[in-house]
Structures are given as structure tokens and as C-alpha cells.
Amino acid sequence: MAKTEQQRESFRASLDKQPHEVATMFDGVAKRYDLTNTVISAGQDRYWRWATRKALDLRPGERVLDLAAGTGVSTVEFAKSGAWCVATDFSKGMLAAGSFRPVPMVAGDAMALPFADESFDAVAISYGLRNVSDPDLAMREMLRVTKPGGRLVIAEFSTPVLPLFRTVYMEYLMKALPRVARAVSSNPDAYVYLAESIRAWPNQRQFAMRMAEAGWSEVKWRNLSGGVVALHRGYKLG
């Protein structure tokens, strides 16, 4: 039986990240997703998107896959470089919410991308890999669709580097973030999942090792906002 609009807007995925559950949850937050992100990040989301574009080092005419693009706000940021950028997400509700944006949008699963081998000069995924049930398979799929010499940039919530700040941040995630989400989100329960999934995600060094194991080379990372977010970059050699 199909879920009603009200059910979707109160739905929360579990940490085993079944694809249909995650897609349903994001369908439920789509209407106010961008606003909620700006509020809960105190406006830093704009800086994080800019930093991700800089890390991609895009050039006019390049082909770029923005994976887990949601409403396409990050895709528009990347397109400022003059590159051709396509937004891909498996939540049709998110893509519909961003359909007014002037970028191509394609529904697709990160674990089985609907693109040919070596289609893109660069791939980006921002705050989405954490929601995939098999992130390692997804990173291998990203490698498949990237041209030799191409690069991948992953922006993801990570582990603050200073112990005191890390303690305060984790307290915010589990207590304050869900309360803030209740005031602005169309699906506040989803932000309980968000907090839990961030806490369960590997730290910067652990994740860099997983990127390398998936086949990416010269993997490095840069911390943003004290490690609240980490930008990991790798290249496809050969």
C-alpha cells in the first residue's frame, strides 16, 4: 500500500538504510529541505557548497555528476564553473522540489548508476553517501562512471578534531538538532536519523582508507568548520 503524504512526512529510516525507507524519508523532507539545512548549519551550508566546488577544480566544458543532489542546489553551485552538471538522486520527491532549477535532473541509485562507463570528468556527492546502504559499492560505481584522470569529491559530516568541541557538537546532534528541526522541517523525525547516522559514520582517516579500498588513488581530506564536515578527494588513475 502506498504511503500517504502525512505518513511520508513523519517517516524515519532505520540505520540499516534500506533504500525504499531512505527514499521515503527524503520525499518527506523535500519541501523544506534547503531551508532546514541552512537553519541547522547556521548558514554554513553555503560555505560548504562553495568549498566543495573549489575542491572539484572544475573547468568549462567538463562533465560533472552531482550525486545525491537532492533539490539541485549544489548542482547549481557547481555549474557556476561553466561545467555541464547533472543532478542525480533516488528521491523523486527531492528532484521534484528542485525542478525549477536550471540543471538537468535524473533519478538514479548510487549503487547502480544509470550512466555509461567513463562518462564524467568529476563526481561529487554531498552528505548523501552516509545514507547509502552499501557506500563501498557506491564508491566503486562512481569510479566506473569517471574518466581516467578524473576525480571524486565527497563532502560528508565527520568528526570534529578538538575534543571539547567534539563533545559539544555530539551533544548538539542528539539533543538540540531534533528540536531545531521540529521548528522548520516538514519531517522532524528524519533529523533524529540524521544525528544517529552522523555519529555512526567513520572518522576522516577511516573513511579515507575506505575510499582507497574502493579503488580511488591519492586520497586526501580537508576539514571544514573544525571537522564538522570533511572534504575527501581522490583520483581515478589509469
Image (tube, rainbow, N blue to C red):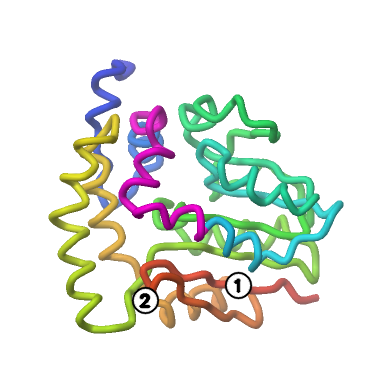
Closer to the camera in the image, 186 or 20: 186
- Mark 2, Cα crowd under 10 Å, few <14 / some 14-19 / many 20+, is some
> Quick check: 222 left or right of 36?
right
Q: Residue at x 24, y 39 (%)?
A: 12
Closer to the camera in the image, 28 or 133: 28
Q: Position of residue 24 (x, y in %)?
A: 36, 31
Furthest residue toward right: 61
Label 1 sits on residue: 233
Closer to the camera in the image, 138 or 127: 127
Q: Which residues are magenta?
A: 27-48
Q: Position of residue 158 (x, y in %)?
A: 37, 69
The local secondary structure at tag 2 comes to loop
Q: Amino acid at mark 1?
A: Arg
- Report the disc number at residue 36: none
Q: Residue at x 63, y 45 (%)?
A: 75
Q: Examine the rendered structure and indicate whether residue 227 appears above or below residue 188.
A: below
Label 2 sits on residue: 203
User: What secondary structure is the stretch in magenta mostly built from?
Assistant: helix
Q: Amino acid at mark 2?
A: Asn
> Quick check: 125 left or right of 21?
right
- Mark 1, Cα crowd under 10 Å, few <14 / some 14-19 / many 20+, is many
Quarter holding the C terminus?
Answer: bottom right
3D distance between C-alphas at marks 2 and 1: 15 Å
Q: Examine the rendered structure and indicate whether residue 106 appears above or below residue 82.
A: above
* Quadrant position of residue 173: bottom left
Pointer 2 or 1: first along the chain: 2
